[in-house]
Amino acid sequence: MSVPSTASAGSPPVRPRRDSPFTALSHRPFRWWFLSQITSASGGMTQAVATSWLVLQMTGSALDLGVLSAATVLPSLLIGAWCGALVDRLDRRRVLIATQSVLTALGLALYALIAAHLAAYWSILVLSAGSGLVLALDGPARQVYVLDLVGRRRLASAVSLYEVILNTSRVLGPALGGTVLVLFGAAACVLVNALSFLAPLAVLLLQRPAAATADQRPDAPVVRRGAARAGLRYAWSVPAIRSCLLIAAASGILFNSGLLFPLMADRAFHLGGGGYAALVCVFGVGALPGALLAARGGEPTGRQVAALAGLTGLCTTATAYAPHPALLYLGMAAVGFSSIWMVARANTFVQLQAAPGLRGRVMGAWTMALPGASPITALAVGALAGAAGPRVAFACAGLLLLAIVTGSWRTLAATPADHRPDSGPYDSPPVDDPAPDTQQA
């Protein structure tokens, strides 16, 4: 945000600190959106704790937990690129109004089934897949909407603050979910999630259409037949973006708290439901400072992303073989710290590397990787955990990250923060910062 200079003529203008992790909060529309997302993300984690524990009690199968996770995110893998193409064409605010409304309805349907004791494993899978279809569009729309709100100069702060939201939810969500689960049951956890979508929905409805920075956003490109495939080809043809997509896909194993987290808590350390919730909570506590660090230091470089991915791989592999629950919690906090720092920098790096006219499709590809690749990784890791144990499966997640970093280090290390390859006929002018606080919620 620009600050009027109080210096005399000829003196350099007064400028805000550019390394503050809270820069994006100076912009009022983003501030309202940020607060609403804390509520929504915490509700999602509350439901995740309940449904994962409910399925584990129903079936007792690690593979079934993997299938549940796959049902939620498989649509992002299958149609993420096409959803990204839609995001490039449509008004992001209206898209998000629609997605929040449908997610509320699906949450209420699942609540009704559980409360009436009619929920079965298959019905949870069906409703999870329905939510996944909506989230496949919601994901890229949400990420590009943040850039619409804050502009390029505040993007690193905004993306990192969004990671703060997610990891605040990993603290508040499991704590709330564990409490509600014990006191009121799984149905109440699902109801909390359904109602949590009302906060962002209210912000979107009350926000004036101009608050989506329509005057600053580039004109929507003419998206022709095959545009989604063209966007995927573009993302895969840029080596730095391709490397980040592979890192994002591998890191999805760590963010799937409904798979390895309950298995590590229950099967490896015998900590029960409270221990599972505490493990997710500790991950979130460790991640908060990592997200704040990601907002500092200006625009990320490829070398930073690669170094953080390597650190995350090492922390994950070491944590897998913690000999005592105390060391497990300490290691999980370290994994949360490094992984969120990594993914926030990688997300910002990818958005700034992408051509503006293709940004929705590139972020659609990002959503296909994280969380979209989880159906593949969840099934593989669930099967591996069932055959060799959760420790081996968790260690393999770290080794996979280390392998990707080893193969892509040279590419990422050679890519500066401000490098953007030509994008051909889809390119359009970059997005500028919106005027400070001229729009309101």
Image (cartoon, rainbow, N blue to C red):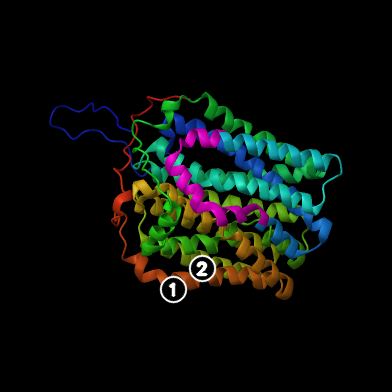
Q: Which comes sooner in the sequence, label 2 or label 1?
A: 2
Residue occupying the point 45% across, 30% down: 29
Q: Position of residue 145 (x, y in %)?
A: 45, 39
Asked if labels 1 and 2 touch by Cβ distance under 8 angstroms, the answer is no
- In the image, the segment drawn in magenta is 71-97
Cα separation, mark 2 vs mark 1, equals 9 Å
Residue occupying the point 78% across, 55% down: 55
Q: State the residue in front, 296 or 82.
A: 82
Q: Does residue 79 belong to the magenta stretch?
A: yes
In the image, taking residue 161 as reference, residue 317 lies left or right, namely right
Q: Position of residue 246 (x, y in %)?
A: 48, 64
Label 2's element?
A: helix
Q: Position of residue 201 (x, y in %)?
A: 58, 31
Can residue 158 be seen by looking at this rendering?
no
Residue occupying the point 53% across, 61% down: 249
Q: Would you name the residue on which mark 1 appears? A: 406
Q: State the residue in front, 10 or 261.
A: 261
Q: Residues within 10 Å of mark 2 (few under 14, many from 20)?
A: many
In the rendered structure, which amino acid carries the disc numbered 2?
A: Leu
Q: Would you name the residue on which mark 2 appears? A: 401
In the rendered structure, which amino acid carries the disc numbered 1?
A: Thr
Q: From what the image shows, is residue 297 above or below residue 437?
A: below
In the image, taking residue 142 as reference, residue 64 lies left or right, namely right
Q: Position of residue 280 (x, y in %)?
A: 66, 53
Q: Tell me which corner region of the image, top left, top right, bottom left or bottom right, holds residue 191.
A: top right
In the image, taking residue 191 as reference, residue 346 lies left or right, namely left
